[in-house]
Image (spheres, rainbow, N blue to C red):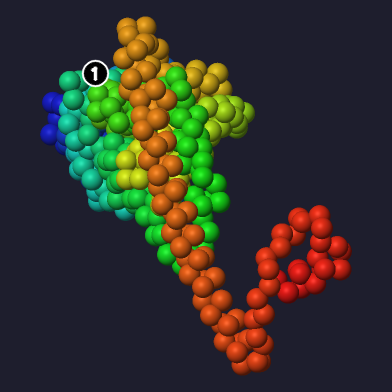
């Protein structure tokens, strides 16, 4: 029949009352058919679907029931759903499609759902996709699409777009996307990637990598307040902690000085050994087996070793900060992709097994290892504000307390963000925490190493063996000076009281009758005379 028509000049059926619409599909594709442009006889959507079928090698599909049947409406074809004879859905999931996606897909102007996931369609995604203005759901994952993604910003009703599992490269055009559901915008923007540079998609809600694992792409808590990453936040954290420590120490110093100037007895007067007690407390807080105790001494070498140890610990912790970076375009991060976006459904799921029990154990570990150092460091900062200490003691207490508190709090911070980034189970969060807490013991390990190398050298830099005697002499001299000043103030007050008593006696006319001094302890004085003597005195 086709050969006959090709030789003829015209197939004319206009006005034939015996033919019903739609006309047989084979007629609508004949070049000489006079009703080929009649929408009721030859629906444009059916023509578009025929082109789609042929371009995607429909004859090889797993299920192509009713497709291209000349006497069946296209609404009855497998995977096609219509409303008022208008195609609104085309769903052919895992149906063996191959070939390419026809640009004639734009002829389905009423299409709301296009789901061709889990097939073997090749080539580029046609730009005509952007003409489907009524499209709500676009699912093309797990195919073999290549090239770049065309502009599709003129789709105001689009609520879901999934393109992962393909070989799309370059940059996904911005869609002014405002939907925050994790499964709403999924592409292969994660790492590792099949390409040297992974797909760039700033608006995607989910990024998948070459292994098929995915991770939700959303703003972190620090990004919501305008901080780009954890590295920058860490420096802000240290600056804030230093500022708080300085403010606390200066406030306490000012208060202690005010109390002294207003004759309010302080601990240094009531307890002469308070400075020595503070130093011993600081040594116990820092730990006798830690290089941090060098902060309490006056050896510059000791201070250098202690500061170098602090620097090494912070450097090691920053390795974990970089590993916890939530940058899906960075291959160097340790971030674990815990989400899965299955082939047979549109919703992605988080497969991590970490729950509240793991975080509870994490909290217990952190409290057991760090809370003591945080409290002791804070107390040392408080002691650095006491006026009874000299300048060196205040600097030592402030430096030791601030650094001890900083390292402990920073360890807690690093452990938290690192486990949030990579921990996927309760046992994994415990293992990660133990590894990071080990860094907190580096100062003690270094001290043990120095003792093995030269124990006398270490004792010379330590507070106990270095400057204890000299410091004690200074403390005693300072205490004696304070006591002398106190005695002078008391004597002055007593003299003033005597003058007032003398004036009162003169006003009352009482004469002072001299009597021979007699000791209260004189055994010859009887009880009555002794009582009279006490009254006179």
Q: Quadrant of residue 391?
A: top left
User: Quick check: 137 left or right of 366?
Assistant: left
Q: Is residue 507 above or below residue 378?
A: below
Q: Quadrant of residue 163?
A: top left
Q: Is residue 435 above or below residue 207?
A: above
Taking the spot 40% from the left edge, 37% from the top edge, the residue there is: 473
Q: Residue furthest top?
A: 452
| On-image quarter of the N terminus | top left
Q: Is residue 237 above or below residue 166?
A: below
99 or 532: which is nearer to us?
532
Whole-percent x, y for residue 300 in the image: 24, 28
Q: Is residue 516 above or below residue 138?
A: below
340 or 268: which is nearer to us?
268
Q: Secondary structure at mark 1?
A: loop
| On-image quarter of the C terminus | bottom right
**Residue position marked by numbered label 1 in the rendering:** 194
Around disc 1, counting alpha carbons within 10 Å, would you say few (fewer than 14), some (14 to 19), or many (20 or more)?
Answer: some
148 or 54: which is nearer to us?
148
535 or 53: which is nearer to us?
535
The answer, for residue 525, to whether it is visible in the render is: yes
Taking the spot 36% from the left edge, 29% from the top edge, the residue there is: 467
User: Quick check: 51 left or right of 531?
Assistant: left
Whole-percent x, y for residue 230 in the image: 32, 37
């Amino acid at each position: 029949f086709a050969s006959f028509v090709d030789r003829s000049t015209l197939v004319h059926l206009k006005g034939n009352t015996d033919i019903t619409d739609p006309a047989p599909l084979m007629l609508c594709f004949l070049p000489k058919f006079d009703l080929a442009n009649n929408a009721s006889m030859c629906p444009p959507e059916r023509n578009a679907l025929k082109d789609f079928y042929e371009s995607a090698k429909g004859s090889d599909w797993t299920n192509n029931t009713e497709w291209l049947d000349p006497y069946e409406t296209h609404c009855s074809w497998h995977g096609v759903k219509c409303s008022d004879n208008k195609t609104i859905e085309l769903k052919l999931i895992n149906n063996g499609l191959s070939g390419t996606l026809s640009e004639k897909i734009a002829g389905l102007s009423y299409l709301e759902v296009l789901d061709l996931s889990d097939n073997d369609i090749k080539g580029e995604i046609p730009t005509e996709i952007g003409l489907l203005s009524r499209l709500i759901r676009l699912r093309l994952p797990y195919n073999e699409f290549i090239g770049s993604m065309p502009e599709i910003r003129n789709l105001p009703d689009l609520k879901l777009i999934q393109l992962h599992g393909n070989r799309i490269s370059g940059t996904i055009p911005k869609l002014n996307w405002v939907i925050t559901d994790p499964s709403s915008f999924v592409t292969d923007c994660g790492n590792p990637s099949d390409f040297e540079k992974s797909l760039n998609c700033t608006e995607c809600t989910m990024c998948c990598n070459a292994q098929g694992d995915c991770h939700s792409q959303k703003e972190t808590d620090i990004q919501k307040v305008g901080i780009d990453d954890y590295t920058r936040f860490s420096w802000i954290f240290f600056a804030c902690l230093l500022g708080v420590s300085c403010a606390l120490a200066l406030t306490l110093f000012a208060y202690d000085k005010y109390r002294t100037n207003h004759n309010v007895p302080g601990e240094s007067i009531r307890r002469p050994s308070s400075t020595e007690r503070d130093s011993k407390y600081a040594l116990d807080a820092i730990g006798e087996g830690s290089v941090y105790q060098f902060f309490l001494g006056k050896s510059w070498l000791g201070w250098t070793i202690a500061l170098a140890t602090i620097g090494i610990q912070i450097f090691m912790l920053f390795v974990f900060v970089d590993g916890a970076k939530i940058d899906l375009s960075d291959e160097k991060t340790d971030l674990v992709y815990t989400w899965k976006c299955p082939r047979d459904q549109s919703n992605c799921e988080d497969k991590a097994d970490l729950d509240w029990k793991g975080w509870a154990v994490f909290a217990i570990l952190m409290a057991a290892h760090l809370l003591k150092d945080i409290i002791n460091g804070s107390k040392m900062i408080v002691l650095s504000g006491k006026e009874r200490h000299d300048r060196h003691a205040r600097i030592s207490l402030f430096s030791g307390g601030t650094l001890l508190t900083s390292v402990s709090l920073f360890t807690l911070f690093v452990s938290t963000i690192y486990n949030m980034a990579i921990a996927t189970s309760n046992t994994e969060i415990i293992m990660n925490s133990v590894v990071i807490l080990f860094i907190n013991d580096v100062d003690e390990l270094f001290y043990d190493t120095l003792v093995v190398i030269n124990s006398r050298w270490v004792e010379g830099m330590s507070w106990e063996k270095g400057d204890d005697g000299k410091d004690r002499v200074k403390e005693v001299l300072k205490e004696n000076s304070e006591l002398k000043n106190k005695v002078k103030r008391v004597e002055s007050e007593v003299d003033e009281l005597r003058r007032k008593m003398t004036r009162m006696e003169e006003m009352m006319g009482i004469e002072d009758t001299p009597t021979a001094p007699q000791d209260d302890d004189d055994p010859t004085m009887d009880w009555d005379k002794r009582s009279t003597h006490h009254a006179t005195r």
